[in-house]
Image (cartoon, rainbow, N blue to C red):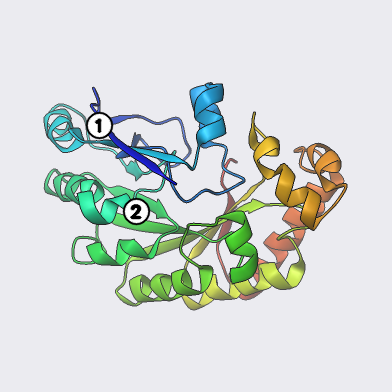
Amino acid sequence: MISYSYIICKNAISHSNLPYLDYSLNPYFGCEHGCIYCYSPSVFHNDKVAKNWGKFVKAKINIVEILSNQLKKLPKGIVGISTVTDPYQPLEEKLQLTRKCIELLSIHKFPVSIQTKSTLILRDKDLIKSEGFDVGFTITTLDDDLARKLQPRASSPSSLSQVIEEFSNEGINTWIFLGPIIPEINDDYESLLKIIDLAKKTRSEIIYDKLNLRPWVLDSMASFLDKEKPGLKERLPFLITNNSDYWYRLKVKLKDACLKKGVLCKAAFP
């Protein structure tokens, strides 16, 4: 059962420290997609928030008015929507906070970079134009069954693939966020090749990232890992260090495959 409520925000957008973005905008606090690998809760340094992440959504009900005031004062820059929650989670269908914010950003000529794993973004195709927008789709795996276990309430990758094609065919700059790459779960070569082929087909760049084991993430994944890959939970922290042989070999394999297919590829955090 998801708990829904409204909150008042003081700022709609804030400066971002993420690569490739100047600002971040999150119309919602919390996310009902329930992805077991999500490290967003660690941003808030709150045990209660982390343990209940995926079970609540708080809508920033005044965000449109606050954004309107902020945009009159801020210098132009790329706005990332969203950075700690999905802007097109189910509640957005009713409240349309993301849509209204996109409309305002377009009016004020702010470039917009959207990232989602929801087919609801199709609703706003009339607003998302080839100029001033790029759209990223998180594809952790193209296996619908595995995806249901990793991100139980997000759109299926098979349906999301069709949405990527639709946006690409409209001339929108699309990219695929390949992540997190989880050792022995979604890292086999054939699975990666399928995602690279999708990127080639849709003229999408691939931005890849490894599993980020920030606080609470391993706890969230524990039940899944114990069932799917007994013993992996204990080895994960060593496999995903930046200097591990595993991660080095995987990056080389991924980059080589992208190069052969003519797909642009870069790390999420260079």
Q: Amino acid at mark 1?
A: Ala
Label 1: how many residues lie within 10 Å, few (<14), some (14-19) or many (20+)? Answer: many
Residue 252 placement, left or right of 198: right
Residue at point 29%, 35% (across, down): 5
Closer to us: 88 or 2: 2
Where residue 174 sits: x, y (%)? 41, 63
Image quarter of the C terminus: top right
Q: Which mark is residue 113?
A: none
Closer to us: 259 or 119: 119
Among the two numbered marks 2 and 1 on one chain, the one whose residue lies closer to the N terminus: 1
Q: Amino acid at mark 2?
A: Tyr
Where residue 184 sits: x, y (%)? 79, 57
> For the residue labelled by badge 2, is the local secondary structure a helix, a strand or a loop?
loop
**Which residue is label 2 attached to?**
88
**Which residue is label 1 attached to?**
12
The image shows residue 107, relative to residue 48, as above or below, that is below
Residue 26 placement, left or right of 240: left
